[in-house]
Image: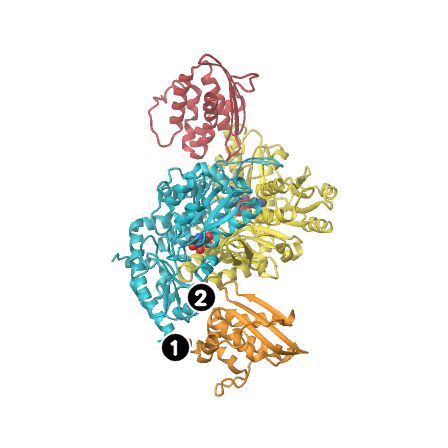
Chain colours: A red, B orange, C yellow, D cyan
Amino acid sequence: MALEDLYREVILDHYRNPRNKGHIDSPDATAHGVNPLCGDEVTIDLTFNGDTVTEVAVESQGCSISQSSASMMTEAIKGKTRSEIESLTNKFKSMMSIEEDTDLGLDPERPGSVLGDIEALQGVRQYPVRIKCANLGWTVLAEALSS
Amino acid sequence: MALEDLYREVILDHYRNPRNKGHIDSPDATAHGVNPLCGDEVTIDLTFNGDTVTEVAVESQGCSISQSSASMMTEAIKGKTRSEIESLTNKFKSMMSIEEDTDLGLDPERPGSVLGDIEALQGVRQYPVRIKCANLGWTVLAEALSS
Amino acid sequence: MTDLSHLKADFPVLENGVHFLDSGASSQKPIPVLEAMDRFARTSYANVHRGAYKLSVASTEAYEAARRRVAEFIGADNPSEVIFVRGTTTALNTVAFGWGLENLQEGDRILSTEIEHHANLVPWQMVAKRTGATLDHIPMTDDFRLDMEAYESMIGPDVKIVTVTGMSNVLGTMPPVRQIADIAHRHGARVVVDAAQLVPHVRVNVSDLGADFLAFSSHKMLGPTGIGVLWGRMDALEETEPFEGGGEMISDVTLQSATWAEIPHRFEAGTPPIIEAVGFHAAIDYLESIGMEKIFEHDMELTEIALQRVGDVPGVSIQGPNNTIDRGGVVSMTMEGVHAHDLATILDEGGVAVRAGHHCAKPLMNRMGVAATARASFYVYNTEQDIDALVTGLRRARELFGMS
Amino acid sequence: MTDLSHLKADFPVLENGVHFLDSGASSQKPIPVLEAMDRFARTSYANVHRGAYKLSVASTEAYEAARRRVAEFIGADNPSEVIFVRGTTTALNTVAFGWGLENLQEGDRILSTEIEHHANLVPWQMVAKRTGATLDHIPMTDDFRLDMEAYESMIGPDVKIVTVTGMSNVLGTMPPVRQIADIAHRHGARVVVDAAQLVPHVRVNVSDLGADFLAFSSHKMLGPTGIGVLWGRMDALEETEPFEGGGEMISDVTLQSATWAEIPHRFEAGTPPIIEAVGFHAAIDYLESIGMEKIFEHDMELTEIALQRVGDVPGVSIQGPNNTIDRGGVVSMTMEGVHAHDLATILDEGGVAVRAGHHCAKPLMNRMGVAATARASFYVYNTEQDIDALVTGLRRARELFGMS
Ligand SMILES: Cc1ncc(COP(=O)(O)O)c(C=O)c1O
Ligand SMILES: Cc1ncc(COP(=O)(O)O)c(C=O)c1O
């Protein structure tokens, strides 16, 4: 059923136990974003080694979708280069897009095999009004990367 | 027919040849009024001898109804005492009132026998939107009298 | 139990079985209101106050009849004290800017409260900034009431205006407006009441209420969007400058200056919401055909049930008075471990429409230490079944979040 | 002759045979517009931008679809440049106060014209008074055009904003907005166009027009009352402060201060005219189903006929350009010896609805040396027969006043 699809165990786990929570003392990049319609907030701190993200920390508050999405994102980008993150972001965005129907090659038999935990957010697409919750962390990430 | 009833000859005559037109140099009372919705204007100057209006002058611009009504009024009040004018004003107002149905004893056989030329304005009552035109001069008069 | 369930047929939008519990944001519109507007537009529409022709006269008469109806509804003797505006927000901005910029200066204080909607907060911040006046806020007690002791210690001769909600759109709390007004008046301050939530649900009589200005919206009381009311006591309106300049609000205009028309016209620049006024009139007729007393009674019965049954769901906290004393039919809640937006989504799946978020009252949220609440608000078409559906949804949320 | 007479059936108010020649004040509403609003209220209404539930999502989508439709209609690439307000008057006040108070100071000049509607005059007077800026007016030539030579001599670096009507509601005159804007921009001034009469009748493309701000009303273009548009070029909107404070227009609020939401939301405080937006959308669809080019052609054909036949009535003077070059379907007239209000009453008896008075343009009336005109204005539902009825009424007026 759809709601079970939205609130999968892995999402609730990230919501309750957000990974990489906190601040970085002197980050190489940082950004803050608010979803003005619901008030959810995300702050991201990053450090780099050359092009590679070495550390990431997120301070946030909001619903299970925005919080778990931000938490999953931190796990997914650590140790990745800027261009790898860009490609990941695009995959995430098309997973969240109602219009686009890019085949990301997700395998229902082997969940997580392509995008890791992030795949669990697929169910959000059935709730268009919640898509911006899932996007919030990624939008703030993009801002941090371009800052 | 109704329109002929509105635009009686006597009204058009007062419109074209307004009586007591002009200003009084040092009036005992004066008042100015505008109908904000249509822009018609009336200014009245009065002099008194005791309680009696000795002179009246009107400067005005506007439609045939407001202009003729003001002109007729000047003729009707000259030489009258304040209390006579008050009673006349009441008669005029009830002639113009849609709700009230006071019997003013107007005699259709002998037009003008009770209120003079003013009776010609009876037709205005069929055009509620024009009643305020007819009233303008009288409203300004009341203001001048109480000033 | 006050039974108004026969009214449901007048609200076609509810036919699909939705449990609509968001009337605090905006109410639904009954068929008689929709029909009144449609009929008017098909038979009598023209611009008002402008034409000497029959359609325009009919239209003006309908518009002015709506003004008289509103005046009667809120117990205002003089219909000219009723000003039609776009809604509560515009009404409050009209007072803040129109009265505030004229009558406030450095050293003056504006007294508002911690529980206001942004509409009764942000305009005063803007005006305080422009005039140099100070903006202070009467605090809330821990049981979600206005702290009247604090108010008495805050009021003083430097307070020029006190502005307070008639009913909180988050808590349901109804501050004692009459008492607040009497105290303010004793100190020479004007009193504004944001009645967006009050007038739709409680019989308001402006002479009893004691306020100098009252603001409310048609769309929260079964009427159309696009229209609302600023009522002002005549002497208070006389102290107020027009908020907008334009046509129909002037007495005379030259290239360099203008003089204002009579009240209320000076506050109604331009073409007003004419068709909306006709719909608003019909909405008031509809409300009165039920009776405001009965409406409030019905609200309170549902609130009583909701406080009990919602309060019984484990993990749920009611954010607002947990009794029906001096409160309206607005029940905000939070659930331990489940964010309000998740609650709203889960409830929506069960056909229950509630609002989740900060409800345009961020300072109040901060005060309560919550980021968001889920809010159920009641109106004439709601029934006990709507509350049962709400409770079912709340239990389902706990289940989904693995807490049952 | 462009035949649009088949449309008349869509306007039930015209069924009783009225010759409605007052669309310049407000237009009638076709059935598809009324039905769109009614249907929306019966199936999809809720407040916008607020709820996570299905009705609110549907309502928000309909509201934003209306915004996109308006943007498309006026050729704006970015729908966020379209701000929904109550009408032209509010749109112009938003620019005057929101832009003017921020960007004008003593020594600056505002340039308006002698032919403006009070809505584009009084707000600038109010803002000039508050900021110490000067307000000057481009004069009218004796053939009822804007004096472009005078304009070129008046413009200068101290002129910060030029505000001009796109089509005079009295004369029909359409000033050369593009040329005016180009000159203004060369001097670094912003350009505002009061398009209340323009957008309903002429295809407007904001990139071609050259203005920075554009104001118009739904009710003059077959749509409902209670809604209108302020369009602003994004960089011009970014220079503009919100005119009203309240809900939905903020990004964050504390007790003492607030930050604004993104454009357009920062200019849409409070509950917007939601049902009206849906009706406005339907009105634009209706206009486009006819075609704006065809609508203007039809206006011009009627204007041509009116200028001839009305001009032929003895004693009548046309107050406005007596040809169809750069003008719209607004024909003002005076009759020697018969006041405009008497004309209007007499015409009304023949079922002809015209407006008589100063048309909210008193300075223009003074300039023309007339106290009032009678004005016929045309729209899609008008026909040659309406003009014939007008002419018959004019002749009847002469008769009644003993001048035939
Ligand atoms: C040229 C012009 N500007 C402004 C307005 C004011 O429009 P609204 O009354 O819709 O605010 C009008 C309409 O009367 C107009 O004709
Ligand atoms: C208490 C309160 N004040 C003001 C408002 C603003 O009303 P509107 O959006 O109709 O302008 C609302 C509604 O959201 C409210 O609940």
Identity, as a three-letter code, of the amino acid under mark 1: Gly
Q: Quadrant of residue D391?
A: bottom left
Structural crowding at the residue carrying mark 2, measured as other residues with C-alpha within 10 Å and reported as few (<14), some (14–19) or many (≥20)? many
Q: Chain of mark 2?
A: C
Q: Which residue is nearer to you in this view: A129 or D385?
A: D385
Q: Residue at x 30, y 65 (%)?
A: D309
Q: Quadrant of the C terminus of chain D?
A: bottom left
Numbered-mark total: 2
Residue D303 seen = yes
Residue type, label 2: Ala
- A125 up-or-down from C130: above or below: above
Q: Quadrant of residue C260?
A: bottom right
Give the class, few, some or many, for how many residues have Cα within 10 Å of label 1's Cα (few <14, many ≥20): few
To which residue does mark 1 refer?
Answer: D402
- Residue with the mark numbered 2: C52
Query: C201 or D79: nearer the eye?
Result: D79
Secondary structure state at the residue bearing disc 1: loop
Report x, y in % for residue D186.
41, 38
Along the line of sight, the residue nearer the viewer: C249 or C199: C249
- Nearest the camera: C224 or D66? D66
Secondary structure of residue under mark 2 = loop
Q: Position of residue D293 (x, y in %)?
A: 29, 50
Q: CA distance from mark 1 to mark 2?
A: 22 Å
Q: Position of residue C290 (x, y in %)?
A: 54, 57
**1 or 2: mark nearer the eye:** 1
Res. C360 mark: none
| Percent position of residue A104, x then y | 35, 23
Check the image and name the residue furthest to the top: A49
Disc 1 with disc 2 on a shared chain = no
Quarter of the picture holding the N terminus of chain D: bottom left
B91 relative to D314, above or below:
below
